[in-house]
Image: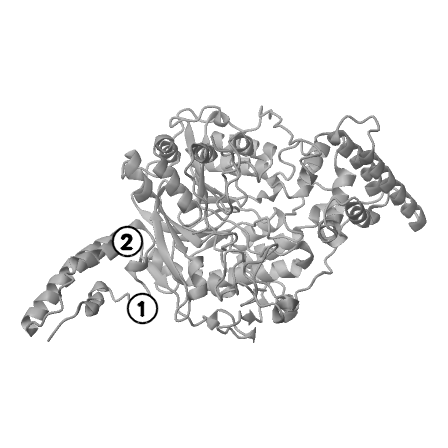
């Protein structure tokens, strides 16, 4: 009987992986080796042969194909790829308002075990998104008890004065002086008639054309950021450094970005750094640890809505959809300008166990870290406490279903309402507790899911949802709420001369000193990265953090982990505050995790580490991704998640890194040295940064390469801002100046 070549691909699946785990779909160089095996099959095999000869051919080809595949499988942590089933895993939620369908996202009837409520459908129904909320609004206490009429007169006079300041010279030298003078007027109003300030800000914004009418309301209405700005005006030193930061945040044309004020670290640390401090030896035993980040669940995702909108978050319902069909209808599993629909979020979670080799269906990794951002990128007028609490409950519940080991999460800047805002306890009266509703909620969920015990959850509730715990392998995990160094947490502008208003970094020092005394190893976990290009964090707090890393590395802190950018990146911390950056001064690494959300123009992804249980160093990092560009063509299967690359395999051979050495700060610095002369490494890093997205810009110029290397060597905002700008993110075309 004849054997035709079109029947032979069945031999390419010796592990029975055709339905879900397909080596030929792996997007890495390793995966492409499977495709190359086809070259072993002669194209001429279509002649008639005997049954015995046919059996010999099959056995010979099986041996040729099986050995390389088994060798490949041994090099990977799990399956090379995972094709997600089309059926939605309905058992994840106990009941539904709207069942999942091929043309619609589900609407689970989500029960909150902490608040003991079931969230209503209209909170997340794409067609009934609330445009206002009834959340409490906090104002600073007024210094006088004025009548409404008097308050209105004061506000009117203040608005006239502020407009006059900007429309005439008035003896003021420049825009910065004018802005500070305007803040001084606003401060009087905020102290005397605080409840009138948000409406006044909206009016000032609209009448001066500072922003569009809609943006003015979104930015300054009381329930959005208006009450927050009132607190800032009343409590900040508007004529000092606070004022210059405020003015620069409003517009860089008002005041230039303030420079770093050198810190006095005398007496900062309880004990001096031990002489010849070094990392402990490895035990030789390794475990698998997951790193997930930036889920950004969009429970309001509307299938077939416009996925290529021109502003805001796409894949949302529009009243005009019936008369104006979408140019690019939103696929069931997501798109590049959209956040994560339920179908995509659960697809990612379903793929983890198989790809990482940590289980069947449910991952049994040693532990998982989650570096923040749960909530979708909604405009502020569509945000609410309830929506944040819904999203926290939903995602942590999904984690509990698919991740068997403990999860150690941190809050991201989007995990609050208003977004980005967390208040330090040092603010007066109820203002210092205005974010506690969220800390109480997430710490309760973490305890409910068995990730923190009652004592640690209680501590997290009173400490900005940050905690210090020792896990079951003996590693101490210390988390920080990085909103207290995020530039868009406007409350940070109050007393900005103090780099640790919240007291978090003092707590970090205390915990690190205890760990040093006890001989413990530590991972530090946060959301907003401390450096890279310096565009996200504030100068003072990250400068202080950098010096904390210097003091307690490499002997106590093994690694640090971040999210926020949605991209696959890394930072290196050096001794002496980064004044000299070379292989001998490289102390620690900041691993920035890829996002599950595709927003913006990225593929969806996650990472897994091989970690030594003695030193808690990382010996390999595996990154996995799903090609979002393929989602619109899916019909008979769900998306495919694939192995993308091994960090060791991608870079270690080029720099001659020993197989027995961890992927530490020295490893990463040596890679940046190699990048200086080997531009292909820069291109490779740039590709991985976007998780292989077809929309990532190329980094082929010398200017781009120099900038990337500089970002990698910058663990603080000050160092990052000294780098060439415009090449930091792959989410849009580079704007930096080429040589």
Say if residue 363 shows up in the picture: no
Which one is nearer the viewer's eye here, 127 or 520? Answer: 127
- The label nearer to you, 1 versus 2, is 2
The reply, left or right, for residue 497 in relation to residue 272 is: right
Residue 640 versus residue 574 in the image, above or below: below
The disc, 1 or 2, on the residue closer to the chain's N-terminal end is 1
Q: Residues within 10 Å of mark 1 (few under 14, many from 20)?
A: few
Q: Quadrant of residue 641?
A: bottom left
Residue 480 on image: x %, y % = 55, 43
Which one is nearer the viewer's eye here, 86 or 447? Answer: 86
Which one is nearer the viewer's eye here, 33 or 606? Answer: 33
Residue 257 on image: x %, y % = 64, 32
The reply, left or right, for residue 166 in relation to residue 27 is: right
Q: Quadrant of the N terminus?
A: bottom left
Residue tagged 2 = 32
Q: Quadrant of residue 643?
A: bottom left
Q: Image point 43% across, 72% down: which residue?
A: 87
Residue tagged 1 = 19
The reply, left or right, for residue 176 in relation to residue 628 is: right
Say if residue 45 shows up in the picture: yes
């Amino acid at each position: 009987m004849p054997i035709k070549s079109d029947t032979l691909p069945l031999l390419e699946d010796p592990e029975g992986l055709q339905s879900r785990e397909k080596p030929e779909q792996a997007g890495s160089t390793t995966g492409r080796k499977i495709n190359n095996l086809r070259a072993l099959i002669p194209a001429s095999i279509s002649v008639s042969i005997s049954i015995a000869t046919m059996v010999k051919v099959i056995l010979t080809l099986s041996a040729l194909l099986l050995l390389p595949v088994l060798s490949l499988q041994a090099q990977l942590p799990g399956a090379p790829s995972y094709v997600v089933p089309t059926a939605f895993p309905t058992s994840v939620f106990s009941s539904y308002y709207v069942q999942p369908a091929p043309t619609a996202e589900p609407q689970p009837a989500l029960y909150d075990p902490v608040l003991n409520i079931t969230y209503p459908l209209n909170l997340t129904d794409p067609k009934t998104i609330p445009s206002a909320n009834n959340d409490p609004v906090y104002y600073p206490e007024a210094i006088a008890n004025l009548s409404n009429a008097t308050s209105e007169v004061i506000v009117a006079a203040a608005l006239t004065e502020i407009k006059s300041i900007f429309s005439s010279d008035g003896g003021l030298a420049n825009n910065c002086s004018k802005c500070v003078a305007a803040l001084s007027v606003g401060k009087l109003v905020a102290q005397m008639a605080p409840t009138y300030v948000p409406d006044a800000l909206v009016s000032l914004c609209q009448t001066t054309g500072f922003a569009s009418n809609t943006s003015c309301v979104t930015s300054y209405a009381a329930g959005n950021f208006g009450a927050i700005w009132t607190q800032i005006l009343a409590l900040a030193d508007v004529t000092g450094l606070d004022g210059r930061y405020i003015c620069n945040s409003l517009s860089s044309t008002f005041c230039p970005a303030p420079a770093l004020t050198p810190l006095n670290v005398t007496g900062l640390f309880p004990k001096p750094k031990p002489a010849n401090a070094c990392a402990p030896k490895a035990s030789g035993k390794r475990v698998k640890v997951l790193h997930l980040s930036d889920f950004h669940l969009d429970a309001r995702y509307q299938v077939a809505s416009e996925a290529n909108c021109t502003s805001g978050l796409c894949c949302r319902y529009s009243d005009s959809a019936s008369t104006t069909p979408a140019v690019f209808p939103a696929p069931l599993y997501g798109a590049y300008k959209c956040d994560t629909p339920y179908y995509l979020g659960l697809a990612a979670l379903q793929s983890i166990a198989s790809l990482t080799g940590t289980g069947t269906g449910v991952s049994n990794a040693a532990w998982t870290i989650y570096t923040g951002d749960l909530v979708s990128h909604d405009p502020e007028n569509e945000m609410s406490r309830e929506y944040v609490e819904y999203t926290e409950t939903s995602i942590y519940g999904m984690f509990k279903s698919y991740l068997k080991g403990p999860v150690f999460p941190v809050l991201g800047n989007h995990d609050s309402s208003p977004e980005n805002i967390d208040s330090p306890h040092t603010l007066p009266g109820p203002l210092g507790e205005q974010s506690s509703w969220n800390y109480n909620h997430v710490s309760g969920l973490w305890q409910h899911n068995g990730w923190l015990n009652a004592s640690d959850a209680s501590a997290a509730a009173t400490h900005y949802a940050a905690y210090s715990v020792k896990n079951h392998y003996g590693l101490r995990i210390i988390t920080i709420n990085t909103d207290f160094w995020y530039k868009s947490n406007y409350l940070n502008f109050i007393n900005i001369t103090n780099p640790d208003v919240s007291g978090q970094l003092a707590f970090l020092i205390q915990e690190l000193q205890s760990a040093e005394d006890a001989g413990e190893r530590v991972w530090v976990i946060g959301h907003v990265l401390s450096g890279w290009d310096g565009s996200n964090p504030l100068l003072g707090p990250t400068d202080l953090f950098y010096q904390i890393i210097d003091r307690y590395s490499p002997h106590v802190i093994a690694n640090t982990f971040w999210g926020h950018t949605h991209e696959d990146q890394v930072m290196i911390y050096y001794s002496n505050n980064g004044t000299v950056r070379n292989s001998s001064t490289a102390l620690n690494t900041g691993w920035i995790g890829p996002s599950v959300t595709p927003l913006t123009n990225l593929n969806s992804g996650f990472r897994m580490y091989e970690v030594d249980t003695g030193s808690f160093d990382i010996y390999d990092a595996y990154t996995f991704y799903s090609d979002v560009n393929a989602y619109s063509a899916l019909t008979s299967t769900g998306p495919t998640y694939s192995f993308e690359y091994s960090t060791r395999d991608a870079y270690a051979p080029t720099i001659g890194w020993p197989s027995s050495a961890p992927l530490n700060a020295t490893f990463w610095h040596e890679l940046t040295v190699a990048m200086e002369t080997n531009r292909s490494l820069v291109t490779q890093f740039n590709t991985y940064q976007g998780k292989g997205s077809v929309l990532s810009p190329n980094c082929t110029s010398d200017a781009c390469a120099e900038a990337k290397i500089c970002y990698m060597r910058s663990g603080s905002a000050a160092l990052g801002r000294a780098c060439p700008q415009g090449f930091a993110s792959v989410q849009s075309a580079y704007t930096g100046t080429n040589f």
